[in-house]
Image (spheres, rainbow, N blue to C red):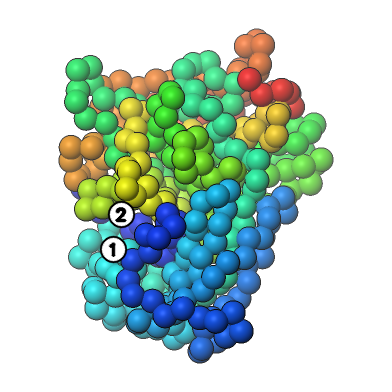
Amino acid sequence: MRPGAVITRLLLASVLVSAGSLPLAETALASTQNIDPATSLQSVSCPLGSQLIMPQASTVMNDGWIRTQYEINGVQVGEDVPPAGADLVHAPDSVFEAHNMETRGEQGATATEWQAEMTHFVQNRTIGMCWTKGTFAAPIYQPYPPSHNWGGDAVTPAPNSTYRYSGVDARFSQANPNVRSCLSTAWLVSWDGLGQPGSPLLQAGTVWQESGGVFQGEHAFYEIVGGVKDTGGMIYLTNVPIGAGNTIDTQVYIPSLNPHLVEFTVWNVSTATSQMAYIDYSPGYPPNGLYADYIDERAQLGANYAQLPNYSMTSWTAMNVMRSNSTQWTPAYGEGGAINITMTSDDGLTTLSTAYQIGSMSTMSNLWKNCGLYEPAK
Protein backbone atom coordinates (compact mmCIF):
# COMPACT_ATOMS: atom_id res chain seq x y z
CA MET A 1 0.00 0.00 0.00
CA ARG A 2 1.00 3.62 -0.42
CA PRO A 3 2.88 5.31 2.47
CA GLY A 4 0.53 7.59 4.38
CA ALA A 5 -2.59 5.75 3.24
CA VAL A 6 -4.77 3.96 5.71
CA ILE A 7 -5.05 0.43 4.34
CA THR A 8 -8.23 -1.47 3.55
CA ARG A 9 -8.14 -3.77 6.53
CA LEU A 10 -11.58 -5.28 6.81
CA LEU A 11 -13.59 -6.59 3.92
CA LEU A 12 -14.75 -9.80 5.49
CA ALA A 13 -15.33 -8.82 9.12
CA SER A 14 -13.83 -11.94 10.65
CA VAL A 15 -13.32 -11.25 14.33
CA LEU A 16 -11.29 -13.09 16.91
CA VAL A 17 -12.39 -11.91 20.33
CA SER A 18 -11.84 -12.80 23.95
CA ALA A 19 -14.81 -14.39 25.65
CA GLY A 20 -17.17 -11.77 27.04
CA SER A 21 -15.76 -8.92 24.92
CA LEU A 22 -18.22 -8.95 22.00
CA PRO A 23 -19.31 -5.40 21.10
CA LEU A 24 -22.79 -4.24 20.06
CA ALA A 25 -26.15 -5.37 21.34
CA GLU A 26 -27.15 -8.80 20.04
CA THR A 27 -30.17 -11.07 19.89
CA ALA A 28 -29.28 -14.68 20.71
CA LEU A 29 -30.65 -17.39 18.44
CA ALA A 30 -31.96 -20.69 19.67
CA SER A 31 -30.12 -23.69 18.24
CA THR A 32 -33.22 -24.70 16.26
CA GLN A 33 -33.46 -21.35 14.45
CA ASN A 34 -31.89 -20.51 11.13
CA ILE A 35 -28.97 -18.19 11.93
CA ASP A 36 -29.88 -16.09 8.88
CA PRO A 37 -33.59 -15.35 8.42
CA ALA A 38 -32.98 -14.23 4.81
CA THR A 39 -30.92 -17.08 3.42
CA SER A 40 -28.67 -19.79 4.84
CA LEU A 41 -24.95 -19.19 4.91
CA GLN A 42 -22.77 -21.37 2.71
CA SER A 43 -20.36 -23.66 4.52
CA VAL A 44 -16.76 -23.04 3.51
CA SER A 45 -14.84 -25.76 1.71
CA CYS A 46 -11.62 -26.36 3.61
CA PRO A 47 -8.37 -27.09 1.76
CA LEU A 48 -6.70 -30.46 2.12
CA GLY A 49 -4.89 -30.72 5.43
CA SER A 50 -7.08 -28.26 7.31
CA GLN A 51 -9.95 -28.87 9.71
CA LEU A 52 -13.42 -27.39 9.32
CA ILE A 53 -14.39 -25.63 12.56
CA MET A 54 -18.08 -24.83 12.87
CA PRO A 55 -19.47 -22.19 15.23
CA GLN A 56 -20.50 -22.91 18.79
CA ALA A 57 -23.16 -20.18 18.79
CA SER A 58 -24.76 -17.60 16.50
CA THR A 59 -26.42 -14.24 17.07
CA VAL A 60 -28.25 -11.71 14.95
CA MET A 61 -27.09 -8.16 15.61
CA ASN A 62 -29.42 -5.18 15.74
CA ASP A 63 -28.64 -4.15 12.16
CA GLY A 64 -29.24 -7.63 10.73
CA TRP A 65 -25.61 -8.71 10.53
CA ILE A 66 -24.86 -12.22 11.77
CA ARG A 67 -22.13 -12.96 14.28
CA THR A 68 -20.92 -16.55 14.56
CA GLN A 69 -18.68 -17.62 17.43
CA TYR A 70 -16.00 -20.29 17.26
CA GLU A 71 -13.27 -21.70 19.44
CA ILE A 72 -9.90 -22.48 17.86
CA ASN A 73 -7.04 -23.68 20.06
CA GLY A 74 -8.81 -22.23 23.10
CA VAL A 75 -9.23 -18.82 21.46
CA GLN A 76 -12.76 -17.48 21.02
CA VAL A 77 -13.24 -16.72 17.34
CA GLY A 78 -16.09 -14.90 15.65
CA GLU A 79 -17.16 -13.71 12.21
CA ASP A 80 -19.56 -10.94 11.13
CA VAL A 81 -21.57 -11.52 7.94
CA PRO A 82 -23.78 -8.85 6.27
CA PRO A 83 -27.46 -9.38 5.45
CA ALA A 84 -28.21 -10.87 2.05
CA GLY A 85 -28.41 -8.19 -0.63
CA ALA A 86 -26.86 -5.48 1.55
CA ASP A 87 -25.78 -2.41 -0.44
CA LEU A 88 -22.43 -1.65 1.16
CA VAL A 89 -21.30 0.54 -1.73
CA HIS A 90 -23.84 3.16 -0.60
CA ALA A 91 -23.98 2.29 3.11
CA PRO A 92 -23.27 5.05 5.68
CA ASP A 93 -19.96 5.12 7.49
CA SER A 94 -21.70 4.09 10.72
CA VAL A 95 -22.22 0.60 9.28
CA PHE A 96 -18.52 0.13 8.60
CA GLU A 97 -17.56 1.53 11.99
CA ALA A 98 -19.97 -0.83 13.78
CA HIS A 99 -18.33 -3.83 12.11
CA ASN A 100 -14.72 -2.68 12.45
CA MET A 101 -14.45 -1.76 8.78
CA GLU A 102 -12.68 1.31 7.47
CA THR A 103 -14.94 4.11 6.22
CA ARG A 104 -14.73 5.44 2.67
CA GLY A 105 -12.60 8.41 3.60
CA GLU A 106 -10.09 6.16 5.32
CA GLN A 107 -9.63 3.74 2.46
CA GLY A 108 -6.24 3.40 0.82
CA ALA A 109 -8.00 1.84 -2.16
CA THR A 110 -9.27 3.83 -5.13
CA ALA A 111 -13.02 4.39 -5.55
CA THR A 112 -13.13 1.66 -8.20
CA GLU A 113 -11.27 -0.81 -5.96
CA TRP A 114 -13.57 0.06 -3.06
CA GLN A 115 -16.72 -0.67 -5.06
CA ALA A 116 -15.36 -3.94 -6.41
CA GLU A 117 -14.29 -5.08 -2.94
CA MET A 118 -17.63 -4.22 -1.35
CA THR A 119 -19.49 -6.08 -4.09
CA HIS A 120 -17.39 -9.21 -3.52
CA PHE A 121 -17.69 -8.85 0.24
CA VAL A 122 -21.50 -9.07 0.22
CA GLN A 123 -21.32 -12.17 -2.00
CA ASN A 124 -18.99 -13.99 0.42
CA ARG A 125 -21.59 -14.96 3.03
CA THR A 126 -20.04 -18.08 4.53
CA ILE A 127 -19.88 -20.06 7.73
CA GLY A 128 -17.00 -22.15 9.07
CA MET A 129 -13.27 -21.64 9.52
CA CYS A 130 -10.36 -23.77 8.32
CA TRP A 131 -7.56 -24.51 10.77
CA THR A 132 -4.26 -26.23 10.00
CA LYS A 133 -3.52 -27.61 13.44
CA GLY A 134 0.20 -28.05 14.03
CA THR A 135 1.28 -26.50 10.71
CA PHE A 136 3.21 -23.31 11.33
CA ALA A 137 4.57 -20.70 8.97
CA ALA A 138 7.16 -19.83 11.61
CA PRO A 139 7.36 -21.93 14.79
CA ILE A 140 10.05 -19.77 16.42
CA TYR A 141 11.25 -16.23 15.91
CA GLN A 142 14.57 -16.27 14.08
CA PRO A 143 15.49 -13.11 12.16
CA TYR A 144 19.17 -13.85 12.46
CA PRO A 145 21.11 -14.99 9.39
CA PRO A 146 21.48 -17.71 8.55
CA SER A 147 18.03 -19.16 9.19
CA HIS A 148 16.94 -22.72 8.50
CA ASN A 149 13.46 -21.77 7.29
CA TRP A 150 13.32 -17.98 6.74
CA GLY A 151 14.55 -16.05 3.73
CA GLY A 152 14.01 -12.32 3.21
CA ASP A 153 14.53 -9.13 5.21
CA ALA A 154 13.72 -7.80 8.66
CA VAL A 155 13.95 -4.10 9.50
CA THR A 156 14.44 -2.61 12.96
CA PRO A 157 14.34 0.92 14.44
CA ALA A 158 17.39 3.12 14.57
CA PRO A 159 19.67 2.70 17.62
CA ASN A 160 18.36 4.41 20.78
CA SER A 161 14.87 4.77 19.30
CA THR A 162 12.00 4.56 21.78
CA TYR A 163 9.40 3.34 19.31
CA ARG A 164 8.58 -0.16 18.12
CA TYR A 165 6.36 -1.23 15.19
CA SER A 166 2.58 -1.36 15.40
CA GLY A 167 2.12 -2.21 11.73
CA VAL A 168 3.75 -3.90 8.76
CA ASP A 169 2.46 -3.92 5.17
CA ALA A 170 3.76 -5.07 1.79
CA ARG A 171 2.81 -6.29 -1.67
CA PHE A 172 4.28 -9.19 -3.59
CA SER A 173 3.59 -11.09 -6.77
CA GLN A 174 2.34 -14.56 -5.87
CA ALA A 175 5.02 -16.99 -6.97
CA ASN A 176 4.48 -19.87 -9.38
CA PRO A 177 6.80 -22.64 -8.16
CA ASN A 178 7.56 -25.59 -10.37
CA VAL A 179 5.60 -28.65 -9.31
CA ARG A 180 7.98 -31.60 -8.82
CA SER A 181 10.94 -29.23 -8.65
CA CYS A 182 11.79 -30.97 -5.36
CA LEU A 183 11.70 -34.64 -4.44
CA SER A 184 9.47 -34.50 -1.37
CA THR A 185 6.87 -32.35 0.37
CA ALA A 186 7.46 -28.69 -0.52
CA TRP A 187 5.82 -25.54 0.85
CA LEU A 188 6.38 -21.88 0.07
CA VAL A 189 4.97 -19.44 2.62
CA SER A 190 5.19 -15.70 1.85
CA TRP A 191 4.23 -13.36 4.69
CA ASP A 192 4.91 -10.16 6.57
CA GLY A 193 4.71 -9.88 10.32
CA LEU A 194 5.68 -8.28 13.63
CA GLY A 195 7.77 -9.88 16.33
CA GLN A 196 10.96 -10.14 18.32
CA PRO A 197 12.77 -12.91 20.18
CA GLY A 198 10.80 -14.08 23.20
CA SER A 199 7.59 -12.46 21.98
CA PRO A 200 4.61 -13.73 19.95
CA LEU A 201 4.95 -13.58 16.18
CA LEU A 202 2.01 -11.97 14.36
CA GLN A 203 1.81 -12.72 10.63
CA ALA A 204 -0.37 -12.76 7.52
CA GLY A 205 0.40 -14.09 4.05
CA THR A 206 -0.06 -16.88 1.53
CA VAL A 207 0.96 -20.53 1.34
CA TRP A 208 1.72 -22.73 -1.70
CA GLN A 209 1.64 -26.51 -1.09
CA GLU A 210 2.90 -29.60 -2.87
CA SER A 211 2.97 -33.15 -1.55
CA GLY A 212 4.51 -36.14 -3.29
CA GLY A 213 4.76 -34.24 -6.56
CA VAL A 214 1.06 -33.29 -6.49
CA PHE A 215 0.02 -29.63 -6.25
CA GLN A 216 -2.22 -29.15 -3.18
CA GLY A 217 -3.26 -25.53 -3.73
CA GLU A 218 -2.42 -22.04 -2.50
CA HIS A 219 -4.23 -20.11 0.19
CA ALA A 220 -4.34 -16.89 2.21
CA PHE A 221 -3.71 -17.29 5.95
CA TYR A 222 -2.88 -15.60 9.23
CA GLU A 223 -1.62 -16.89 12.58
CA ILE A 224 -0.13 -16.00 15.94
CA VAL A 225 2.75 -18.10 17.21
CA GLY A 226 3.43 -17.97 20.93
CA GLY A 227 1.82 -16.22 23.88
CA VAL A 228 -1.71 -16.38 25.26
CA LYS A 229 -3.34 -16.01 21.83
CA ASP A 230 -1.36 -18.69 20.01
CA THR A 231 -3.61 -20.01 17.22
CA GLY A 232 -1.92 -23.43 17.20
CA GLY A 233 -1.44 -23.33 13.42
CA MET A 234 -2.45 -21.35 10.37
CA ILE A 235 -6.04 -20.21 9.86
CA TYR A 236 -6.99 -19.91 6.19
CA LEU A 237 -8.83 -16.87 4.82
CA THR A 238 -10.86 -18.95 2.38
CA ASN A 239 -12.76 -16.05 0.79
CA VAL A 240 -9.54 -14.77 -0.82
CA PRO A 241 -8.61 -16.87 -3.87
CA ILE A 242 -4.87 -17.02 -4.53
CA GLY A 243 -3.33 -17.66 -7.95
CA ALA A 244 0.08 -17.47 -9.59
CA GLY A 245 0.98 -13.95 -10.63
CA ASN A 246 -1.69 -12.29 -8.47
CA THR A 247 -0.70 -9.09 -6.69
CA ILE A 248 -1.10 -9.80 -2.98
CA ASP A 249 -1.16 -7.18 -0.23
CA THR A 250 -0.59 -8.42 3.34
CA GLN A 251 -0.81 -6.47 6.55
CA VAL A 252 -0.56 -6.87 10.31
CA TYR A 253 -1.69 -3.80 12.24
CA ILE A 254 -2.37 -2.71 15.82
CA PRO A 255 -4.77 0.25 15.45
CA SER A 256 -4.07 3.34 17.54
CA LEU A 257 -7.80 3.86 18.18
CA ASN A 258 -8.14 0.38 19.69
CA PRO A 259 -4.70 -0.80 20.81
CA HIS A 260 -6.17 -3.95 22.40
CA LEU A 261 -6.61 -5.40 18.90
CA VAL A 262 -4.29 -6.85 16.32
CA GLU A 263 -5.68 -7.02 12.79
CA PHE A 264 -4.61 -9.33 9.95
CA THR A 265 -5.44 -8.68 6.30
CA VAL A 266 -4.75 -10.46 3.03
CA TRP A 267 -5.98 -8.56 -0.02
CA ASN A 268 -5.77 -10.03 -3.52
CA VAL A 269 -5.54 -6.81 -5.51
CA SER A 270 -5.86 -8.72 -8.80
CA THR A 271 -9.27 -10.21 -7.93
CA ALA A 272 -10.56 -7.37 -5.69
CA THR A 273 -11.11 -9.84 -2.84
CA SER A 274 -9.93 -9.35 0.70
CA GLN A 275 -10.49 -10.80 4.14
CA MET A 276 -9.52 -9.60 7.58
CA ALA A 277 -9.41 -11.12 11.05
CA TYR A 278 -8.50 -9.67 14.42
CA ILE A 279 -7.67 -10.90 17.87
CA ASP A 280 -8.70 -8.96 20.96
CA TYR A 281 -6.11 -8.99 23.75
CA SER A 282 -8.39 -7.15 26.21
CA PRO A 283 -7.75 -6.29 28.97
CA GLY A 284 -4.15 -6.57 27.82
CA TYR A 285 -2.43 -5.41 24.63
CA PRO A 286 -0.83 -7.19 21.67
CA PRO A 287 2.94 -6.78 21.55
CA ASN A 288 4.48 -4.19 19.26
CA GLY A 289 7.33 -5.58 17.18
CA LEU A 290 11.01 -4.80 17.45
CA TYR A 291 11.26 -6.24 13.95
CA ALA A 292 9.05 -5.91 10.86
CA ASP A 293 9.57 -9.01 8.73
CA TYR A 294 9.15 -9.72 4.99
CA ILE A 295 9.71 -13.43 4.51
CA ASP A 296 9.56 -16.30 2.02
CA GLU A 297 9.75 -19.50 4.00
CA ARG A 298 9.58 -23.26 3.98
CA ALA A 299 6.97 -24.23 6.56
CA GLN A 300 7.39 -26.50 9.55
CA LEU A 301 5.15 -29.56 9.25
CA GLY A 302 5.06 -31.27 12.62
CA ALA A 303 8.70 -31.88 13.59
CA ASN A 304 10.18 -31.31 10.12
CA TYR A 305 10.93 -28.49 7.72
CA ALA A 306 9.42 -28.93 4.28
CA GLN A 307 11.50 -28.47 1.15
CA LEU A 308 11.56 -25.09 -0.58
CA PRO A 309 10.01 -25.37 -4.08
CA ASN A 310 11.68 -23.63 -7.01
CA TYR A 311 9.82 -20.31 -7.08
CA SER A 312 12.62 -18.54 -8.96
CA MET A 313 12.09 -15.10 -7.39
CA THR A 314 9.54 -13.28 -5.26
CA SER A 315 9.33 -9.53 -5.89
CA TRP A 316 8.33 -7.51 -2.83
CA THR A 317 7.16 -3.90 -3.22
CA ALA A 318 5.37 -1.21 -1.17
CA MET A 319 7.14 -2.48 1.97
CA ASN A 320 6.03 -0.17 4.78
CA VAL A 321 6.01 0.01 8.56
CA MET A 322 3.87 1.82 11.09
CA ARG A 323 5.88 3.17 14.01
CA SER A 324 4.18 2.83 17.38
CA ASN A 325 4.47 6.61 17.89
CA SER A 326 2.93 7.47 14.51
CA THR A 327 -0.22 7.03 12.42
CA GLN A 328 1.60 7.24 9.08
CA TRP A 329 3.06 4.43 7.00
CA THR A 330 6.74 4.90 6.14
CA PRO A 331 9.04 2.96 3.76
CA ALA A 332 10.66 -0.03 5.42
CA TYR A 333 14.20 0.73 4.32
CA GLY A 334 14.02 4.21 5.83
CA GLU A 335 14.44 2.58 9.23
CA GLY A 336 17.60 2.11 11.29
CA GLY A 337 18.72 -1.18 9.88
CA ALA A 338 17.83 -4.13 7.68
CA ILE A 339 18.81 -7.71 8.44
CA ASN A 340 19.29 -9.75 5.29
CA ILE A 341 18.18 -13.29 6.10
CA THR A 342 19.72 -16.14 4.09
CA MET A 343 17.99 -19.51 4.38
CA THR A 344 20.28 -22.53 4.67
CA SER A 345 20.00 -26.26 5.30
CA ASP A 346 20.23 -27.51 8.88
CA ASP A 347 23.97 -28.09 8.57
CA GLY A 348 24.48 -24.62 7.11
CA LEU A 349 26.27 -25.96 4.03
CA THR A 350 23.53 -25.42 1.42
CA THR A 351 21.99 -22.02 0.64
CA LEU A 352 18.26 -22.30 -0.08
CA SER A 353 17.43 -18.65 -0.73
CA THR A 354 18.92 -15.16 -0.56
CA ALA A 355 17.39 -11.68 -0.64
CA TYR A 356 18.59 -8.27 -1.67
CA GLN A 357 17.26 -4.73 -1.77
CA ILE A 358 17.04 -3.48 -5.34
CA GLY A 359 17.61 0.25 -5.04
CA SER A 360 14.31 1.34 -3.51
CA MET A 361 13.24 2.34 -0.02
CA SER A 362 10.43 -0.21 -0.20
CA THR A 363 11.44 -2.93 -2.67
CA MET A 364 13.20 -6.27 -2.21
CA SER A 365 13.74 -9.47 -4.21
CA ASN A 366 14.08 -12.93 -2.71
CA LEU A 367 15.88 -15.51 -4.87
CA TRP A 368 15.45 -19.28 -4.76
CA LYS A 369 18.71 -21.28 -4.76
CA ASN A 370 18.03 -24.87 -3.67
CA CYS A 371 15.26 -27.23 -2.52
CA GLY A 372 17.08 -28.36 0.57
CA LEU A 373 16.03 -31.54 2.38
CA TYR A 374 12.87 -32.58 4.17
CA GLU A 375 14.70 -32.47 7.50
CA PRO A 376 14.17 -32.11 11.25
CA ALA A 377 13.28 -28.61 12.41
CA LYS A 378 15.72 -26.81 14.68
Q: Earlier in the sequence, mark 1 or mark 2?
A: 2
In x, y percent, where is residue 210?
73, 43
Q: Residues within 10 Å of mark 1 (few under 14, many from 20)?
A: many
Q: Position of residue 159 (x, y in %)?
A: 23, 17
* Most distant residue in the bottom direction: 38
Above or below, comparing residue 89 to residue 130 in the picture: below
Give the image location of residue 141, x and y in percent: 49, 26
321 sits to left or right of 125: left
Residue 358 visible? The answer is no
How would you rate the neighbour count of disc 2 (Cα within 10 Å): few for under 14, some for 14-19, many for 20 or more?
many
Q: Is residue 64 visible?
A: yes
Which residue lies at the image location 53% right of the left edge and 15% below the top edge?
146
Which corner quadrant holds the C terminus? top right
Asked if marks 1 and 2 touch (Cβ < 8 Å), the reply is yes
- Tally of numbered tags: 2
In the displayed structure image, the side of residue 48 where residue 151 appears, left or right: left
Of 179 and 296, nearer the camera is 296
Q: Residue at x 32, y 42 (%)?
A: 285
Q: Amino acid at mark 2?
A: Ile
Say the numbered circle drawn on residue 102: 1
> In front of the other: label 1 or label 2?
1
Q: Quarter of the image holding residue 45?
A: bottom right
The label number, if any, that marks residue 7 in the structure image: 2
Identify the residue shown where x is 38% and y is 76%.
26
